[in-house]
């Protein structure tokens, strides 16, 4: 072992922060976004490191997409007073990163020497996905890590890309680098091993992450979740507006009865709010897609209990939610800016305004109509009453789910077209009964639905799958809600009062 330093080493989090700032000075903001790599500050890194439970003895830790090794440094700073050995493996492809990563790891080595902790390090300058899949395919593969700490890159991966092809070799399907990295790390750690990661919370819902949620929930216990009350908190220096969460998992452990959820205004907040939630409220047995609801306090638990306990599914009501059938760029020759003979209304998100339909819109960026002919017949639905929502909402919007009613009297036509950036509720392919549609409109526009939806959805997308997952009041309750509302002008207070009285 090297001779111990005469003076105590510098705080490793401070060292990593210096290197992080230096790298950011060399990589402009657009390049970091292109790489999907946003490095953790010392405050964020400390939150991840502090989540680990077993800090004594031998540690074999994986840091994939290590950057300048901020997370490894935070882990070493946390455990070095209790550890006997630390065996660190960092994956990092960037040559710029690797120069600073080496410096951070040297300080980790020096600090371990000072604390009489055996230190070993490996830096792998290869693609983490390809390299890990090759390891997992070996006949004699045995998991070699008992810890993993991750801030993986955040980028979509192509359905035809090499990453997807590699992941399919081990029967793992996912559409983003971050879920690929975490999924592989789960497979690489041994039973009883701990994983802590910071990622977008988009994996909590939606069909794109079904395979990832299955792996996570089948193979691990979710023990702790940390959320930031502001979208900008985790990576504010990089101006990242993604909603991020930090979570702690134990592989091969039966799911614990409760999950500890902490929330803070920012990473530097010294007094995060701590709330213990029954696991059954985080992942409901009623949801076959196993969406993950993040509940941070008593009010949110009451919302989850109330909204999640509603009696009906859409199937029970004889209703279905679908994505609009018209993809405008695939039928450009049939688009018309204005409503003309031989055309029908084409409803885009721009037409959904103030919880109602404004059509046509003069001088709009999008067309108002679609020609009705044999080439477009399959894109149409029967003219009638439908409830519509936008699939994409703006970050600044007060509510995620904003519903509008389309009615047959908008135009004297037999069919109508809905753009695929909208969702529409229908009676198994037919228009909705007017009274039921009005009640559904009231319910979807309630604050209850909005708050419940945000617990499971960390992005601005509202997919048809999400709407199908919600629980709904009975048909009688919905019709009663519709009878009580004044449709002349949207009033949130009145909507919420009606829903509160009715369920």
Image: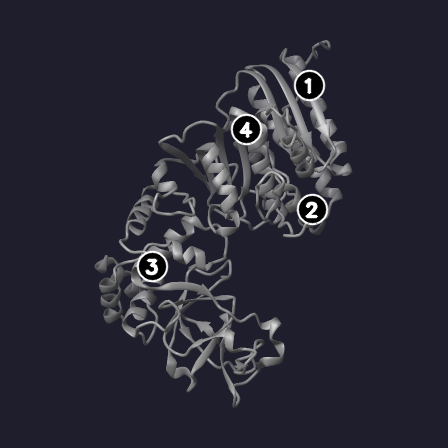
- Residue placed under numbered mark 1 in the picture: 120
**Image coordinates for residue 490, horizontal then vertical, percent:** 34, 70
Q: N-terminal of the two: label 4 or label 2?
A: 4
Assign a secondary structure to mark 3: helix
Return the residue nearer the eye: 16 or 206: 206
**Image coordinates for residue 467, horizontal then vertical, percent:** 40, 58
Q: Quadrant of residue 126?
A: top right
**Image coordinates for residue 357, horizontal then vertical, percent:** 42, 75
Q: Is label 2 or label 1 in front?
A: 2
Taking the view exactly as shown, the residue that stands out farthest to the front is: 139
Evaluate if marks 4 and 2 touch, with contact meaning CB atoms under 8 Å apart: no
> What is the distance, in whole Å, between disc 3 and disc 4 at their CAs?
45 Å
Evaluate if marks 3 and 1 touch, with contact meaning CB atoms under 8 Å apart: no
- Residue placed under numbered mark 3 in the picture: 315
Residue 49: which numbered mark, if any?
4
Assign a secondary structure to mark 2: helix
Q: N-terminal of the two: label 1 or label 4?
A: 4
Q: Is label 1 or label 4 in front?
A: 1
Q: Is label 4 or label 2 in front?
A: 2
Residue 162: which numbered mark, if any?
2
Q: N-terminal of the two: label 3 or label 1?
A: 1
């Amino acid at each position: 072992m090297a001779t111990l330093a005469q003076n105590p080493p510098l705080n490793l989090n401070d060292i990593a922060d210096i290197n992080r700032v230096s790298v950011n000075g060399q990589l402009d903001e657009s390049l970091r976004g292109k790489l999907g790599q946003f490095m953790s500050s010392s405050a964020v890194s400390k939150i991840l490191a502090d989540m680990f439970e077993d800090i004594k003895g031998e540690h074999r830790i994986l840091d994939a997409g290590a950057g300048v090794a901020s997370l490894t440094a935070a882990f070493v700073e946390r455990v070095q007073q209790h550890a006997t050995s630390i065996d660190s493996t960092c994956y990092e492809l960037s040559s710029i990163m690797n120069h600073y990563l080496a410096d951070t790891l040297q300080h980790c080595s020096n600090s371990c020497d000072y604390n009489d902790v055996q230190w070993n390090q490996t830096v792998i300058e290869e693609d983490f996905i390809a390299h890990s899949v090759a390891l997992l395919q070996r006949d004699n593969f045995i998991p070699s890590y008992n810890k993993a700490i991750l801030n993986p890159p955040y980028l979509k991966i192509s359905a035809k890309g090499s990453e997807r092809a590699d992941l399919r070799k081990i029967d793992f399907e996912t559409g983003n680098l971050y879920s690929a990295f975490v999924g592989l790390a789960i497979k690489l750690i041994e039973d009883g091993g701990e994983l802590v990661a910071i990622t977008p919370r988009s994996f909590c819902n939606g069909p794109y992450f079904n395979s990832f949620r299955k792996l996570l929930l089948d193979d691990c216990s979710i023990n702790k979740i940390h959320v930031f009350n502001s979208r900008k908190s985790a990576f504010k220096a990089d101006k990242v507006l993604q909603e991020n969460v930090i979570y702690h998992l134990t592989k091969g452990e039966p799911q614990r009865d409760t999950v500890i959820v902490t929330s803070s205004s920012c990473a530097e907040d010294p007094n995060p709010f701590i709330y213990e939630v029954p696991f059954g409220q985080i992942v409901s047995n009623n949801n076959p897609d196993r969406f993950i609801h993040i509940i941070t306090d008593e009010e949110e638990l009451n919302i989850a209990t109330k909204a999640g306990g509603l009696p009906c599914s859409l199937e029970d009501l004889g209703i279905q939610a679908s994505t609009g059938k018209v993809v405008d760029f695939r039928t450009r020759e049939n688009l018309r800016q204005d409503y003309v003979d031989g055309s029908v209304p084409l409803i885009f998100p721009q037409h959904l305004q103030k919880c109602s339909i404004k059509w046509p819109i003069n001088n709009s960026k999008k067309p108002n109509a679609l020609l009705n002919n044999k080439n477009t017949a399959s894109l149409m639905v029967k003219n009638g009453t439908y409830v519509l929502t936008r699939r994409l909402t703006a970050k600044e919007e007060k509510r995620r789910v904003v519903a509008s009613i389309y009615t047959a009297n908008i135009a004297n036509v037999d069919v109508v077209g809905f753009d695929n950036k909208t969702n529409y509720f229908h009676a198994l392919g037919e228009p909705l009964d007017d009274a039921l549609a009005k009640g559904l409109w009231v319910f979807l526009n309630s604050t209850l639905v909005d708050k419940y939806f945000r617990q499971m959805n960390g992005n601005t997308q509202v997919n048809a799958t999400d709407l199908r997952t919600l629980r709904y009041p009975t048909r009688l309750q919905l019709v009663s809600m519709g009878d009580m509302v004044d449709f002349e002008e949207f009033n949130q207070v009145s909507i919420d009062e009606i829903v509160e009285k009715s369920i």
